[in-house]
Image (tube, helix red, strand yellow):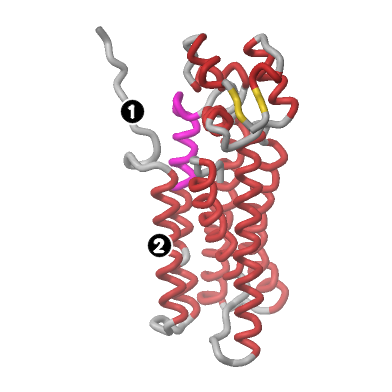
Amino acid sequence: MNNRLKVLRAERDWSQQDLAERLEVSRQSVNAIEKGRYDPSLPLAFKIADVFGLTIEDIFSRD
Amino acid sequence: MTTEKHRPSGVLGRGPAFWAVMVFISTALIVTLSVTGAIEQKAPLLLLTIVPVSLAMVMFRAGYKMADSPSASCGGKGAAQKTYIKRTAIFTSLYLATFGLLMFADREIGIEGELKFALALLPGLAICGIFWAIGRLIVEEKDEFMRMLVVRQALVATSVALSAATVWGFLESADVVPHVDAYWWAVAWFFGLFLGALANRVQYGTWGAV
């Protein structure tokens, strides 16, 4: 699964740590999701979408 | 302009991964001494296990300090890991204390019967406490990615320990290898945790929580 986390983060000038704090997860989690090594669960995907004020489809897409 | 001075986390400037490697090396040395027959008596071998256990304590301390460092985690996410480290440190201390008590009582007092059974039971129960702490970590960890890493580690550890026990058991039945006391399979399981952490590092770029 592809995602736009890095771009969206950069647009807001957030570090991985900043995003991790907003999502209440570890920085390692954000890093793994961002690099496509780990696909988040649906609840976490919704949380990510909420943090960016977007829909899940705006952030994640199929390979 | 002010620069924030970097304070190294861990113990003696070394993180938990370094101390985990030390635990592995010391355990491997003891196993080698045992298997090669360099030390044949059981008592010195058991006493030597204090070295990896002590190093494990240092590893837990390093992990705790790292979990406390601002750059390591965030938003209370590290709470489950900190609780795990505390629990493991307590059970490791209990293991050391009960094992020391057993050795002292057995060699100096020469206990027998039910009292010996009870004292011999305690170190094993303390190690069971560490297994319980890992189970609780899986239950209490709210960060799903970190939880998955722990589960992966536990699966690798279980595969390693059960495979090693099975293969060795058949070899031992065929009288082609020496007898190994059953508690070494717990050591194999902890070694498997280390391999699981390595696998996590390769696949996900991070060691995991345990």
Contact? badges 2 and 1 (CB < 8 Å): no
Q: Chain of mark 1?
A: B
Q: Of helix, strand and loop, which one carries label 2?
A: helix
User: What's the residue at 60%, 85% (across, down)?
Assistant: B171
Residue B60 x/y as whole percent: 49, 45
Q: Is residue B82 left or right of residue B7?
A: right
Q: Amino acid at mark 1?
A: Arg
Magenta run includes residue B54: no
Q: Is residue B5 left or right of residue B30?
A: left
Q: Which mark is residue B25?
A: 2
Who comes first in sequence, dot 2 or dot 1? Answer: 1
Q: Is residue A25 left or right of residue A45?
A: left
User: What's the residue at 48%, 76% (across, down)?
Assistant: B43
**Splitting the image into 4 quarters, where does residue A60 fall?**
top right
Q: Which mark is residue B7?
A: 1
**Is B18 located above or below residue B40 in the figure?**
above
Towards the viewer: B63 or B108: B63
